[in-house]
């Protein structure tokens, strides 16, 4: 048995499940796949999914919690901004403040926070 042979899903801690659900469902457009008092699963492409669950330590991770691979990062950022998502800005080589997108060789990425302080991202592989 090797873990690489099994599906993986992200688990995202949230302090306020109702507030987080509103963000994931209204700003990001996800539809709950299953709902329980201890969390909500959302399905994504190719059988992937993620769980938001209540935890008092939510929002303490200072790095990217989860990311979505998109075919056109400019379109994804534009659409998310239209839906009310605010993107992070960083002082780093390759980061363009105007577009909110960082370019690192064949990888382009942009980051935003959910209502709980978790850092999420979109990424496009160009190479």
Image (spheres, grey):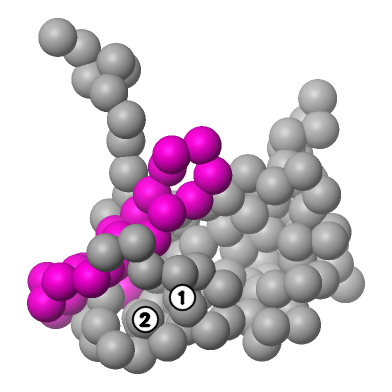
CA distance for labels 2 and 1:
5 Å
Magenta-colored stretch includes residue 43: yes
Q: What residue is shown at x 51% (from left), y 37% (from top)?
A: 46
The residue wearing badge 1 is: 24
Q: Position of residue 8 (x, y in %)?
A: 32, 35
**Label 2 crowding class (10 Å Cα cut-off): few <14, some 14-19, many 20+?**
many
Q: Nearer the viewer, residue 68 or 103?
A: 68
What percent of the width, then of the height, locates residue 116?
36, 81
Is 112 left or right of 116, judged from the image as shown? right
Does residue 6 belong to the magenta stretch?
no
Boundaries of the magenta span: 35-59
Tell me residue 28's x, y (percent).
56, 73
Task: Answer left or right for 10 relative to 100.
Answer: left
Report whether 71 appears left or right of 115. Answer: right
* Residue displayed at 63% across by 44% down: 69
Determine the image quadrant of residue 63: bottom left
The residue lying at 46 percent from left, 75 percent from top is 24
> Badge 1: few (under 14), some or many (20 or more) residues near its Cα, within 10 Å?
some
Report if the CB atoms under discs 2 and 1 are less than 8 Å apart: yes
> Which quadrant of the rendered structure holds the C terminus?
top right
User: What element does badge 1 sit on?
Assistant: helix
Residue named by callout 2: 21
Give the residue drawn at x 75%, y 66%: 77
């Amino acid at each position: 048995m090797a873990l690489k042979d099994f599906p993986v899903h992200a688990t995202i801690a949230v302090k306020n499940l109702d507030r987080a659900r509103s963000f994931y469902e209204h700003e990001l457009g996800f539809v709950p796949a299953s709902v329980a008092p201890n969390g909500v699963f959302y399905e994504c492409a190719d059988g992937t999914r993620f769980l938001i669950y209540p935890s008092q330590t939510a929002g303490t991770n200072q790095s990217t919690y989860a990311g979505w691979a998109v075919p056109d990062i400019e379109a994804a950022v534009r659409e998310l901004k239209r839906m009310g998502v605010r993107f992070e800005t960083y002082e780093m080589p390759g980061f363009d403040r105007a577009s909110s997108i960082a370019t690192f060789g064949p990888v382009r990425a942009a980051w935003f926070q959910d209502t709980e302080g978790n850092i999420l991202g979109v990424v496009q592989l160009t190479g």
